[in-house]
Amino acid sequence: MTEFPEILHHGGKDGVTGSCHELRVDSHNGILIDCGLFQGEDAEIRPSASSPSSLEIDFPLSHIKALVVTHAHIDHVGRIPYLLAAGFDGPIYCSEPTALLLPLVLEDALKIGFTRNARLIDQFLAHLQERLVALPYGQWRHIPLSTSTRLDIKLQRAGHILGSAFVECRIRASSPGSKGSFQRLSTNDQGPGTSLYPSDLRVLFSGDLGAPYAPLLPAPRAPWGADVVVLESTYGDRVHENRRSRRARLRAVLEHALRDRGAVLVPAFSIGRTQELLYEMEAIIHGQPKRQAAPGVAWEDLEIIVDSPLASRFTDAYRQLKPFWDAEAQRRLRAGRHPLAFEQLTTIDSHADHEHTVAYLQRTCRPCVVIAGSGMCAGGRIVNYLKALLGDPATDVLFVGYQARGTPGHAIQRFGPRGGYVMLDGARVDIRAQIHTLSGYSAHADQRNLVDFIRRMRRRPKLVHLVHGEAAAKQALAHELEELGVRVQS
């Protein structure tokens, strides 16, 4: 007999993509936290990964009362079209910035993976807008259920990308003061829990937590407490370098590339990482306006190319969302600076201009920085740059985000330093470029940040479920959390 509440994982438990978790309040009521796309090996190990049906919703929806979106990255929202097609007609709750960004993400996903038919895309986006409910941070929102049990949710800043949130869920038993319904919190793969829970049960879903001092974003703050936490573990086995150090390393990579008079290729997700990199590069250029970056090249002459129509749209959206920027970014604005619209920034929209730029860089020795998607080199315009320039020793490839196993980005990161090769669009491409990884620019919290998130709760959870991480990262993080006296399942 199933005991409620329970947590079920429909993706993102044993890998770092496809996040989709369910909080089942009782047999007739539940909510989803995210509904993301599987990528890399996570997609390959799906039972029907070779067929389009592999992404279809394979769990019941009749009891699902709402979807809560933590942020607009595709591995957290990419299956929403399938969810709506499967008949989900409940509200989609998200933060106010995410309500602006999410339609842009899904519009692009539809064009790449479904159809370029403008009428069909407009119909989907109109249906999506009908479902979207933008919530302010820090305020409880009641979720209507079909029973007398009460469920409320609250979004808090997660510091991962603009609009990202962790989700606090408060479940109140139908009979105040009774523990009968909440004696155990079971999961669909680990069996029932062992602790007694109060009639006012707090369950927290972290989504993706950001690192402190990330550009543009206020750092996440641990809540007062929770009984159960579903916690990401992407970098559960690593500690990032600090911001001053990583900016110095970014500057050193740029100077190295400029001395070689080659292109710096930066695979970056269109939302979040691209804007943070622009922010940091503007700071580097602003701090050294007349100094030469390399013989014959001044910092103020360095061209930064964003070759992604989607990234350009997201950057425009970030500008619209200035009230959600952190205090440092606000000070720069008041000083008259434009961190996301500076003079050296060039954006490329049309495919013809993209092809011209790739060909131009291939036949010349023009030092510049190219930021293009996708972040794991699994598609998008970065692939054409890589095919054209990976074989040139003057090229530098700079990874600033997580590269999931099974993606071309992971292969380049792993085999590039030893002179290996990567398969791109079915063809072998030898790697002679310099390969760099700046993990400090990850938008994910590291091990210390994740442990601190739990440690700083005044009422620490009785149980932590580790998700969104590989086995080694989970194991290392579990060890650290158990040192706090927290029970961990992964």
Image: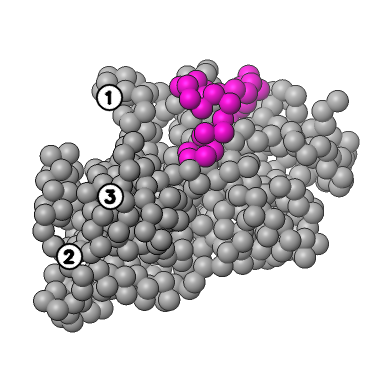
> Which secondary structure lies at badge 2?
loop
Query: Residue 110 lies in magenta, yes or no?
Result: no
Q: Earlier in the sequence, mark 2 or mark 3?
A: 2
Tell which circle, 3 or 1, labels the residue nearer the N-terminal end.
1
Mark 3 sits on what residue?
Answer: 386
Left or right placement of residue 39 versus residue 146 in this view? left
Work out how far the residue at label 1 is from the one at label 2, CA to CA, in angstroms: 35 Å
The CA distance from mark 2 to mark 3 is 16 Å
Between tags 2 and 3, which lies in front?
Answer: 3
Q: Is residue 52 visible?
A: yes
Q: Residues within 10 Å of mark 3 (few under 14, many from 20)?
A: many
Q: Which stretch did the figure color magenta? A: 39-67
Task: Name the residue beneath numbered marker 2.
Answer: 367
Looking at the rendered structure, the secondary structure element under dot 3 is helix
- The local crowd at label 1, few if under 14, some if 14 to 19, many if 20 or more residues have their Cα within 10 Å, is few
**Which label belongs to residue 116?**
1
Q: Residue furthest bottom?
A: 291
In this view, the residue in front, 175 or 483, is: 483
Instruction: Give the mark toward the camera: 1 or 2.
Output: 2
Tell me the kind of residue under disc 2: Pro
Tell me what residue is drawn at x 45 percent, y 22 percent: 52
Whole-percent x and y of residue 425? 32, 37
**Drawn side of residue 490 relative to residue 78, left or right:** right
Sooner in the amino-acid sequence: mark 1 or mark 2: 1
Three-letter amino acid code at the position of disc 3: Leu
Residue 243, image x, y percentages: 44, 72
Residue occupying the point 68% across, 60% down: 476
